[in-house]
Each structure stands twice: as C-alpha cells, then as structure tokens.
Amino acid sequence: KGKLEDLKTPKLLSVDDAFYEGNLLLLPGSHKLSFVTMTSLYDNRACRNMGVFRKMFDMLAREYNLGHIILDCGPHNNTLNKVLCLSADYILPTAHAEHFSVNAIRCFFHDVVSQWMAWRQEHMEKIRKIGFKEEGYFRFDSTPKVLPVLVQRYRLGKNIR
C-alpha cells in the first residue's frame, strides 16, 4: 500500500563469512510475498504495482553499490514470478540432470517465456492507453536475457547408465 514515490530502500543483511569478504548481502524474505496482489480494478494502479520490484532493485543497487542482485524464485508461473523475472536483467534457469528437469526446461523455453512475452505486451498496451509519463520502472522496457541452464546435483560418472 502507498505511493511508489514513498518506497524506501530495504535493509540488507551482511553474511559474516571470510569466504565472501563482506560481498554477500541478503534481503530477508517474507511469507507475506505469497499474498502480494499485483492486479487491481484500476489499470493505472495495477501497472504501478508491477513496477515496485524493479524500482526496489534499482534502489538497492544504488544504495549498496551492488553489481548483481540474485533472486531465487519458486517454480510457479504466477503474476508475482512474471513481474520478478521481467524486472530482472538476466534469468538463470536451474535444472537437475534428469528426465523431469529436461521436460521442465523445454516447457520453460517453449511455453512459459512466450506466455510471459505475450503478457508483457498486454501490460505495455495498458500503459500506452493510460499514458504514463513517469519513470519507466513499470514498463518492462528491456527483455531479460536468459543465461545457459545451470545443471546442479550432477556427478560425473555416477549419472551415466
């Protein structure tokens, strides 16, 4: 609730570990994110809601001089994940070296990404109709780049049949 202009930079926690040399900061999560509503009866309010995360990422990057912000999203195709992923500069899909993950990755590239782009286009059309002249946080002007799939839980020689 509130105005986008009133958004404050969240406080990050520093991971006190010699390995990270003070370079790993965490934003504590909240179960309340599950209840965040991006939609509204009013298109202009819904479009503004979509921009909150991008604005927050930009504020965090400026205040803490961050080079990268890594988000860990659940495997859901809901509005919150669409907004988070389309607010990012890069998407790094992860997978296990097994049949179900291969199908999930295929589905991600062939179905989910194309649905996200169609949803993004609908969102952009609403913004054009409204005629926003403010900062472009809610516009999703840039398309995130999808990086190569990160395969995890794989041991050479143990997964070969």
Image (cartoon, rainbow, N blue to C red):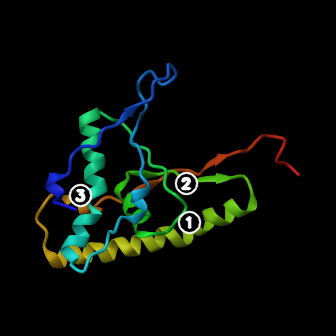
For numbered disc 1, what is the local secondary structure? helix
Q: Residue 89 placed where, x, y %?
A: 38, 51
Residue matched to label 3: 137
What residue lies at 38% left-to-right and 74% top-to-bottom?
119
**CA gap, disc 1 to disc 2?**
9 Å
What residue would you read off at disc 1? 108
**Are the residues flagged by discs 3 and 2 in contact, CB closer than 8 Å?**
no
Specify the label residue 52 is tagged with.
Answer: none
Q: Which residue is mark 2?
A: 93
Q: Is residue 92 above or below residue 22?
A: below
Q: Residues within 10 Å of mark 3 (few under 14, many from 20)?
A: many
Real-space Cα distance between discs 1 and 3?
A: 25 Å
Tell whether 24 sits left or right of 134: right
Q: Secondary structure at mark 3?
A: helix
- At 30% from the left and 38% from the top, the residue drawn is 11
Amino acid, disc 2:
Pro
- What's under tag 1, amino acid-wise? Phe
Residue shown at 41%/27% (left/top)? 23
